[in-house]
Amino acid sequence: MKKKPSYRNNRVADQILKDISLLIQQEIKDTRLGFVTLQHIELTADYAHAKIYVSVFGSEPKISIDILNDKAGYLHSLLFKMLRIHTIPKLKFIHDETQVKGFEMSQLIAKANQDNSQNEE
């Protein structure tokens, strides 16, 4: 059974997400990155690992995720200077496809409704 994250864990995860977002804007100057939005973070209870889910616009998602994962060590070192916690998590960036899947689902529903209205006529 999976343990529910603590309130402190949620606060630390939110702070890490805010700080990483700021660091990406200020420190990563790669033009191939595109417009990156941090969607969600999964932080382990011991703060050792963080999975950061990212959506990307204006660029190929795989390229942007590769750039972020290549810079993860650098972002980790900058995060270490910003946060006042004992353990700074190892960062792993993952492409978040929920928006794309949601858009596709909306299109399917609209098409089904359109087909249904044509059948009723």
Image (cartoon, helix red, strand yellow):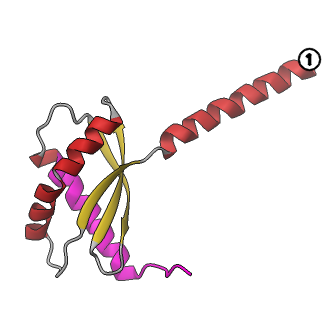
Give yes or no for residue 10 being in the magenta stretch.
yes
Q: Quadrant of the C terminus?
A: top right
Q: Position of residue 61 (x, y in %)?
A: 34, 37
SS at circle 1:
loop
Q: Quadrant of the N terminus?
A: bottom right
Q: Position of residue 115 (x, y in %)?
A: 80, 23
**Label 1 packing within 10 angstroms: few (<14), some (14-19), many (20+):** few
Q: Which residue is mark 1?
A: 121
The overriding secondary structure of the stretch rendered in magenta is helix
**Residue at point 23%, 53% (across, down):** 21
Quarter of image, res 37? top left
| Magenta-highlighted residues | 1-24
109 to 118, vertically: above or below: below
11 left or right of 108 in image: left
42 left or right of 72 in image: right
**Residue at point 57%, 41% (across, down):** 102
Number of numbered labels in the structure image: 1
120 to 35, vertically: above or below: above
105 left or right of 15 in image: right
Q: Position of residue 38 (x, y in %)?
A: 33, 51
**Residue at point 29%, 44% (across, down):** 65
Q: Position of residue 110 (x, y in %)?
A: 70, 29
**Residue at point 56%, 35% (across, down):** 103
Closer to us: 94 or 26: 94
Give yes or no for residue 114 being in the magenta stretch.
no
The residue type indicated by label 1 comes to: Glu
